[in-house]
Image (spheres, rainbow, N blue to C red):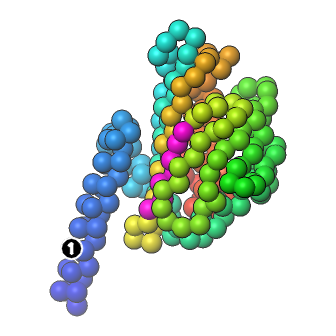
Amino acid sequence: MKRLSLIFLIAFVGYSKDLKSFISKKLELQNAYSKTHLKYVMEGRPIVKVNVTTPKKKRQKIDEMMMVYHKKSCKPVINKMNQYENYVNFFDFIKKSNYKNGYMFLKIRFFLVPRDFMINVKIDRLNEIKSYPFVFNTGFLDGLKGILDIREFNNRCLFNFKMDWEGERTGLSNFILENFMHTIAKYGLRKMLLMTGHGKAF
C-alpha cells in the first residue's frame, strides 16, 4: 500500500512539474511570466494582462492575454462556450449576439464607456480541444487578431487567449482604453467561469 502511494505521489509530482513548465513557457512567450501569475493559474485563478501603447502618432497598439486553468474538463465547458447565439443571455454587457457563416456579431455596452461597440468576429464554433484563430472584421478594433488555445491536463481545461491590435486612435486615451479592455476581460472571464461551473475565482 505504501509503495502504491509512493508511485502515485511520484506521478503527481512529475505531472505537476510538466504542467508548471508548460504554463511557465506560455506565460514567458506572452511577456506575462511571474511567480505570482504562475501560482494564480495553478490555483485556478484567471489572469489578465493588457498593455496599450502609442507606437506612432495618432496610432494605438493593444497587447492582451488571458489564461485560466478551469476546474472542469474541456468538453462540458466547450459545449457551453460555443453557444454564441446565447451570449446575450450569458453576459449582461452583451446586448445582441448571433452567429452565421463563421462570423459572430456582438453588440457590447459596458458601464465604463457610455457607448455601444459593434464587433464582428470571424471564428469557428468551438467543438474540440485545439487552437482557434479569430479576427475582428469590422467595427471596434477592426483588424484585431488573436488565438484561443485550449488544452486539457489531468481532466482540467486550460484556456489561453492572446490578442494583438494596432490601428488609428480609437478616441479613447491609452489609459482609458487599457482599463476598459482589462476590466471587460476580467468581468467577462468571471461570468464565463460561473456559467461553466468553475465557480468564483477572483
Residue furthest out toward the bottom: 1
What's the residue at 42%, 49% (across, down)? Answer: 40
Please, what is the three-letter code of the amino acid marked with disc 1? Ile
As rendered, which of 144 and 87 lies closer to the eye? 144
Quadrant, the N terminus: bottom left
> In this figure, which residue is indicated by the disc labeled 1?
10
As rendered, which of 71 and 67 lies closer to the eye? 67
Give the tally of numbered discs.
Answer: 1
Indicate the secondary structure of the residue bearing disc 1.
helix
Magenta span dominant secondary structure: strand
Q: What stretch is highlighted in magenta?
A: 145-151
Task: In the rendered view, tell whether residue 32 sits above or below residue 97.
Answer: above
Residue 56 place in picture, x, y as percent: 49, 12
User: How many other residues sit within 10 Å of disc 1, few (<14), some (14-19) or many (≥20)?
Assistant: few
Drawn side of residue 43 relative to residue 18, left or right = right
Residue furthest out toward the left: 3
What's the residue at 59%, 66% (across, down)? Answer: 127
Q: Which of the 4 image quadrants contains residue 142?
A: top right
